[in-house]
Amino acid sequence: MITGKSETERRKFINDLIIGVNFEVFRFPSNMKLFDEYYDFIKKEKLYEPWYDAKSYNGNQILDFHWDWISENNSLIIIEEFGQMEEGWRIELLRIYLNEIENRKKGEKKIHLIISQETENGLTEKLAKVIDIRENERRTEKQVVQQNLEIINI
């Protein structure tokens, strides 16, 4: 997570980070506020193609897809100014990423996610309340979040 300075400076920092990366990059529109905007991007980029035909898809279906997609792809996902997204969806999307990262085995594909927002704004605490941890885990929920979500304050 990239925090600090201005939105423009955070964007430039991310641009500098991703120069020459060897991943397929999916850069979501900056300042998404609604889950519908996230969903529209997925449809536009054809990232969600269910095996069945339906007139519409609900949020749970999209999240199921999202879970499958991030676990199977070696892509870089960028979501800028993420702090403005609806709280429930924002936390749920990050919970999915963190759970998937935490449960990776050595040698499995890595998940690459960059998010930016003005400040950390208690996100670590919120994620610690919803993250799933393994039975007999010695770390606290907050330690698991901190280990899997690096915060870079520029």
Image (cartoon, rainbow, N blue to C red):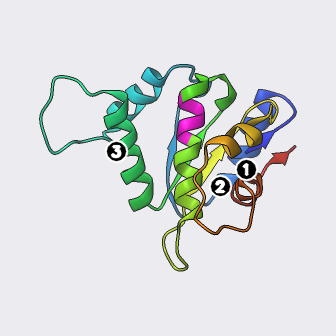
Residue 95 disc label:
none
Task: Identify the disc placed on residue 65.
Answer: 3
Q: Quadrant of residue 72?
A: bottom left
Q: Residue at x 40, y 29 (%)?
A: 39
Q: Is residue 34 left or right of residue 45?
A: right
Query: Which mark is in front, 1 or 3?
Result: 3
Marks 2 and 3: which is nearer the front? Answer: 3
Q: Mark 2 sits on what residue?
A: 19
Marked residue nearer the N-terminal end (1 or 3) = 1
Q: Which residue is mark 1?
A: 16
Q: Residue at x 80, y 31 (%)?
A: 121
Q: Main secondary structure of the magenta part?
A: helix
Visible in this render: residue 81? no
Residue 56 image offset from top left, x and y in percent: 22, 23
- Mark found first going from the N terminus, 2 or 3: 2
Q: Residues within 10 Å of mark 2 (few under 14, many from 20)?
A: few
Find the distance from the CA under tag 1 to the CA under tag 3. 30 Å
* Image x and y of residue 98, in percent: 59, 53
Which stretch is magenta?
89-93
Q: CA distance from mark 1 to mark 2?
A: 6 Å
Compared to residue 25, the image places residue 105 above or below, namely below
In this image, 150 relative to 77: left or right? right
Query: The residue under label 2 is which amino acid type?
Result: Ile
The front one of 145 and 129 is: 129
Specify few, some or many for label 3: CA neighbours under 10 Å numbering under 14, 14-19, or 20 or more: some
Residue placed furthest toward the bottom: 107
